[in-house]
Image (tube, rainbow, N blue to C red):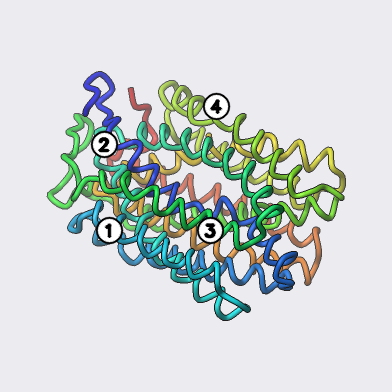
Amino acid sequence: MVNTKNNFQFGLLIPVWAAADGLGQITLLVMPFMIGALVTDLNFGLASAGLVLSIEMGVLSVVALAVSPLMGNISRSKLAVVGALIAMLGNLLSIYAEGFGQISTCRGIAGLGYGLALAAGNASVSSSGRPERLYEHKMVLFGLTLLVVTLLAPFTVRIFGIRGLFAGLTGLSLLLIPLVIRLPNHEGKIAEEPTARVDRRGIRPGVPIIAIIALVSALAIFSVREALAWAFAERIGSGLSMSGELVGLLLGLGSIVGLAGPIVATYVRNVVGVARPAVIGTFLSGLITYAIVTAGNQLQFGAMLLVWGFVYFFTMPLLMGVAAKIDQKGRVIAACSGSLLLAYAAGPAVAGFLTEWGGASALGYFTLSATIVSVLLVAWAILDANKKGIPASAASH
């Protein structure tokens, strides 16, 4: 069903959310609490617990990247359903797994399924006549999902342990199958735009590969920086004498504040365009994660958790909107999503190495450096796209 006023396909919203967020990003949402549960319930070391999540996220992101070039030719609904079934199997096996080897293998299987669903969901964003609007609406649902997960996951772990968390993920994979089956089989009709043409492959004429590389790289560096703070948020809070439930509550409250992010992003984009807000948002998110990883007291840590979601939810629709404008068949946005999660997979390992090497100061210096590089790459991608006549930085009315 199409809303002709906004040229926006609302019928895609729930299936896209189910595939891209309910399946594709659920590991990301439960990551802090899963790491904590592996440490407290199964006596894993922090490095081993982080490696388990790195394996799952690594498989997930590699799969999403590997299938992204095929998104114009394969059925997205079938791919998402297969992904949900594989994820359900991996989660089910995780309940009974013992030891690092078995749990890592089972989480890798779950990551395989999640990666397929993620690629299908994010590529379907481009089936909308206004992909940036669809992504902004999806980010609102992502914020609500984050709220529910951050409130329920700590209590689930405390009452039922890590096995209960795996059981909950198994049930969620099953429940989302009726939703992801509603994804389109292939790419939707590409909306005509008076400001630019697209060729038969769905790519704007003259799109430079350097703009695509710069944008994908920017998302990867952006996400490594975010992952440093997110993956160990529960552990950072624990070091400041805060319970996992309190950290989850603060993250949940932050997600409520974050719901305004996509709304503000829509307004700002319509007024001044994408370019400056995307660059500013990337810079501000870097400052917030710096304050989180170097927090020396509960007040600073808690305050940053409350505003973190808003800046993240403001920035991501703008960055993904640029990706969708470059390639309307969904290959660039799928690649960006894959690189984002690949970076999140590397995040726990990078954080562990930096912490052992130089403590919070090393994390802080890395965060600031990553912020500067990602800001420069985002600006480069937008400028390069504009030179080729792609209105990536123009306001969309």
Front label number (1 vs 3): 3
Q: Which mark is residue 260?
A: 4
Residue 95 in percent (x, y) is at: 55, 67
Q: CA distance from mark 2 to mark 1?
A: 19 Å
Q: Tell me: residue 319, above or below residue 64.
A: above
Q: Residues within 10 Å of mark 3 (few under 14, many from 20)?
A: some
Front label number (4 vs 3): 3
Q: Tell me: residue 159, above or below residue 265.
A: below
Q: Residues within 10 Å of mark 1 (few under 14, many from 20)?
A: many
Q: Residue at x 87, y 44 (%)?
A: 297
* Kind of residue at badge 3: Ala
Q: Quadrant of the C terminus?
A: top left
Task: From the viewer's side, name the closer residue of 254 and 110.
Answer: 110
Q: Residue at x 38, y 39 (%)?
A: 321
* Kind of residue at badge 1: Leu
Q: Which residue is mark 3?
A: 167
Residue 239 in percent (x, y) is at: 84, 55
On the picture, is 220 further left or further right than 157? left
Q: Helix, strand, or loop for circle 3?
A: helix
Residue 326 in percent (x, y) is at: 31, 46
On the picture, is 296 further left or further right than 153? right
* Kind of residue at badge 2: Ser
On the picture, is 36 further left or further right than 340? right
Residue 357 in percent (x, y) is at: 78, 71
Q: Residue at x 38, y 66 (%)?
A: 63
Q: Mark 3 or mark 2, which is nearer the start of the sequence?
A: 2
Q: CA distance from mark 1 to mark 4?
A: 32 Å
Q: Which mark is residue 128?
A: 2
Front label number (2 vs 3): 3
On the picture, is 149 further left or further right than 191? right
Q: Mark 3 or mark 1, which is nearer the start of the sequence?
A: 1
Q: Which residue is mark 1?
A: 79
